[in-house]
Amino acid sequence: MPRTAYTPSLPGLSTTGDLDTVINWGLGADSTAYLAQMITAPDVHGIDLERTAVLYMATGSEWPETRLLVEDFILPLLREHGVRFVQLSRSGHLKADGITVLDDSRHPETLFARGPWTLWDELESVGTVPQQAGTRKCSLRAKGDVGDRWIAPAMGGRPFRQVMGFNADEAGRRFTDIIASKIPGRTGVYPLIDWGWNRQQCEDYLWKRFGVHWPKSYCTFCCFPVSMGALPAHLERMRSHPDIAGEVLRLEYTAMSLNPKAKLYGKRTLLEFFDPSRPRDRACLEAFKRELDMPWALYHVRRLFLLSASGERRPVMRSTERVDLGRARQLGQRLISVSERHGIEVEHDPAYGRARSWVRRRRETWPMAEELFTTAPARVINKQDKNFEPAWDALISGSTTQLPLT
């Protein structure tokens, strides 16, 4: 059964019908600064705490220090003032799976960093990484959509305010948010922009208030630090958490095994930033090797790059099939041997174990097809886009290579 939003019947908890304000809290310095400042004097900021809910949407891969800061400084503040804190997540991959309310309380004790579904689960299962180009679809999927699906039935079309923590350096996001809003009765509120508080002012306020530096809040595998100019700080964060670095390196390595263009930072990989001659970098690389010590699979991957009837490029179609399961070395040696015997181009990465055989490389112009066999950690599921086989047959006349690999 799909999970939907609900309100627990707890003593002293207002019903959703009492709400007139929703505050989006992303755990980062900006929205945290607003929340701490507002709670100090809610009346001054036009907030009735009894009629307010703070929403947090868990993506599943928040940094450990952010979770600790939240539980040490902000949850006690919410408890002290009896602020309703609602923690949400997606329930599954499909929209039909609904959302899960992880906690709904005026006395929150714990930050629930993950729910039954996480962005990491989705990316790893299909063998990809977040994409830098275009909108932040991962954020919309794991945060925006989840919050909207709780808010819409809770408000039932009644007028309400939704407070967004965009700082004064992000004034353009106000207009993007206004255009994107689809919930009846919603009015977006952007206090940090109105106050003129930029990122540095938010950080300074939290330092003065709590005596701590409040770091950026984002997923451990986020691709945007490079475009935000924060890549050096991001890499230092990785070096402080080598086990996390190892996991993210595995995510990227798996994605690049299936698609060499799936680099975490567009033209650069996370892996190339770690120098094995440096002790802290070496710890990350050793953690990466430990992550690779698991069952591997041999995959048959096909892609189609098609044009619409009007000549526009269509979304890339993909078929991923697990052919066999085993250890990295065993599968790699077999793929290399069979490919060489059939005169098929093959690549091997002796450092980390991947073997990749190119049956058909993509061309420079659309329409085109790509086909390969590759070994990778066995975390990717079988998945084929709808109508893939007829489209494949139509483009290449049914010419699918069958290598004796099983």
Image (cartoon, rainbow, N blue to C red):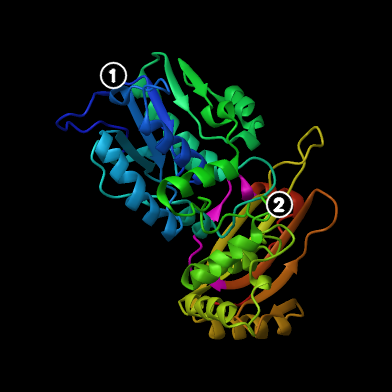
Provide the residue designation for mark 2.
304
* The quarter of the displayed image where residue 347 is located: bottom right
Residue 384 — which label? none
Q: Residue at x 29, y 45 (%)?
A: 76
Q: Is residue 95 left or right of residue 349?
A: left
Could you tell me which secondary element the residue under label 2 belongs to? strand
| Mark 2 Cα shell of 10 Å, populated few (<14), some (14-19), many (≥20) | many
Callout count = 2
Q: Which residue is mark 1?
A: 18
The residue most toward the front is 208
Query: Which residue does the image show at 25% across and 48% down from the upper left?
Result: 109
Which is more toward the observer, 160 or 43?
Answer: 43
In the picture shown, does residue 368 fall above or below 31?
Answer: below
Instruction: Let me know if residue 377 is in the magenta part.
Output: yes
Region of the chain picked out in magenta, as a range: 376-389
Q: Residue furthest right?
A: 365
Q: Position of residue 402 (x, y in %)?
A: 65, 70
Whether residue 239 appears in this view of the structure is yes
Indicate the amino acid at tag 2.
Answer: Leu
**Which quadrant of the structure image shows residue 235?**
bottom right
Residue 308 location in percent, x, y?
Answer: 76, 37
Q: Amino acid at mark 1?
A: Asp
Give the quarter of the image for residue 176.
Answer: top right
Q: Is residue 133 left or right of residue 211?
A: right
Residue 401: where, in percent of width, then height?
A: 68, 67
Relative image position of residue 63 (x, y in whole percent): 46, 58
- Residue at 45% across, 54% down: 212
Q: Quadrant of the N terminus?
A: top left
Q: In front of the other: label 1 or label 2?
A: 1
